[in-house]
Amino acid sequence: MTEKVYFLDDEEQLCLVFQEYMEAFGINTKVFINPHEAITSANNEPPLMMFIDYRLPGTTGDKVALSIPSNIRKILVTGELNVEVGDEFEMVIKKPYKLAQLKELVDQLG
């Protein structure tokens, strides 16, 4: 089964909270702390949407976004103040964020 929403962040606790929150609303969710696993999964079973942290082990969110299919809706989630991204992301969400804000995006874009 293809997941509806992927969430990639190197902070495991954020991933678990995101997954628990979204699944409480019946949203199919898959989370990753490893960017290479997220890229592999996105290429093999593309989700409709993927939230991607900017600072990741050994890479950055923009490089991840360029490594996955272009038809996946990508949203950058970051605490970085001066991040410049290209057209690979539909939008940038600044940390700290509210989970309700992310769910609203899933509802709107998904």
Image: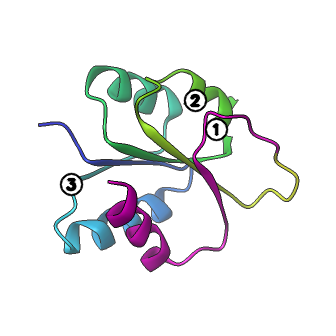
Q: Residues within 10 Å of mark 1 (few under 14, many from 20)?
A: many
Three-letter code for the amino acid on which mark 2 is drawn: Val
Three-letter code for the amino acid on which mark 3 is drawn: Asn
The quadrant of the rendering that contains the C terminus is: bottom left
Residue at disc 3, secondary structure: loop
Q: Is residue 54 left or right of residue 25?
A: right
Residue 45 % position (x, y):
25, 27
Residue beneath disc 2: 64
- Residue 108 falls within the magenta-colored stretch: yes
Q: Is residue 20 above or below residue 75?
A: below
- Residue 44 falls within the magenta-colored stretch: no
Report the residue at 68% width, 45% height from top: 54
Residue at disc 1, secondary structure: helix
Q: Is residue 28 above or below residue 63?
A: below
Report the residue at 49% width, 26% height from top: 36
Report the residue at 65% width, 27% height from top: 63
Residue beneath disc 3: 28
Q: Picture quarter containing residue 72? A: top left
Work out whether residue 95 or residue 84 is closer to the camera in this orientation and state it. 84
Residue beneath disc 1: 61
Mark 2 and mark 1: Cα distance apart in space = 5 Å
Q: Is residue 17 visible?
A: yes
- Magenta extent: 84-110
Mark 3 and mark 2: Cα distance apart in space = 21 Å
Mark 3 and mark 1: Cα distance apart in space = 22 Å
